[in-house]
Amino acid sequence: MSFIGKNWGVWDAVGKRRRSILLGTVFLAAIWAVVTMLATPAEAWRHKGGKSVPVGTITVDGNPADWIAAGIPKLIIDPVGDGGQAGTDLVSIRVADDGDKVYFLFELAGPPVPFSFFGLDVDTNPNTGCAAYGVGMEYGITIDPSPGGLVYIGDARDCGWGSGDFPGALVTATGGNFIEASVPIATLRVLNAALSQFDLGCGTDSCTVHRYVLGHDQAHGGH
Ligand SMILES: [Ca+2]
Ligand SMILES: [Ca+2]
């Protein structure tokens, strides 16, 4: 009996160890679930906003009515009063794409004035490109909204970019407190042929970096 008892004791010890391992695993899984649950909404929220639309939905004419009619949500909402002059103080940014171009609608606190700068991280890797505007930007966007002002997108990997990098690629129009812009997706694929998403950072008025995923309806705009 003592032999059996001993064996039972061994089995019991093994069983306890197994239960202990099992409980430990369950405990770790529970912690991981909570961590994931806490982390996911922020990440998901940060990456949502914007919309893929049919070709012809958006006309770059400075009139935001087409964006409103198409129900394109805000990708970025920015506090008013933190961006210098009203004409460079960001209020919101909407982003959309139609499979051919990426469109931007920048809303400012007043009629746009020089200059607005933005950075696109087209490999969504902060360690590649120029570390500025909260991203590792491959492309820089310069917008001088004054009549005849230069507007361009350029190769910013060395932190400098010029109007001669991709001549005519950035098209803009202003109206009221808005700057509307478009860039061919083909231009963005010059520096990342596999482009499917990008992170958007702001220069003149810093904003919270947000990710835009091409070809998706991304409801629920965020800050
Ligand atoms: Ca328009
Ligand atoms: Ca990058």
Image (cartoon, helix red, strand yellow):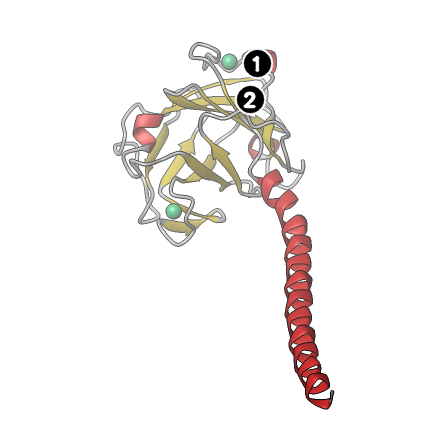
| Mark 1 beta carbon near ligand 1 (under 8 Å) | no
Q: Nearer the viewer, residue 93 or 151?
A: 93
| Mark 2 beta carbon near ligand 1 (under 8 Å) | no
Q: For residue 4, what is the image quadrant?
A: bottom right
Task: Give the image location of residue 165, x and y in percent.
Answer: 26, 34
Q: Which of 80 and 147 is in front in this view?
A: 80
Above or below 31: residue 64:
above
Q: What element carries label 1?
A: loop
Task: Give the image location of residue 54, x and y in percent.
Answer: 46, 13
Q: Nearer the viewer, residue 192 or 207?
A: 192
For image coordinates 35% across by 26% down, the residue present is 185
Question: In the image, 192: left or right of 5?
Answer: left
Task: Give the image location of residue 37, x and y in percent.
Answer: 67, 49
Question: In the image, 33: left or right of 138?
Answer: right
Q: Which amino acid does label 2 sit on?
A: Phe
Label 1, residues with CA under 10 Å away: few <14, some 14-19, many ≥20: some
Above or below 56: residue 178:
below
Q: Distance between the residues labelled 1 and 2?
A: 17 Å
Give the residue at mark 1.
70
Frontmost of labels 1 and 2 is: 1
Label 2, residues with CA under 10 Å away: few <14, some 14-19, many ≥20: many
Quadrant of the frame with the N terminus: bottom right
Question: In the image, 117: left or right of 107?
Answer: left
Q: Which amino acid does label 1 sit on?
A: Ala
Given the current orientation, which residue lies at the most extreme bottom position? 2
For image coordinates 34% across by 43% down, the residue present is 156
Give the residue at mark 2.
178
| Tag 1 near tag 2, CB within 8 Å | no
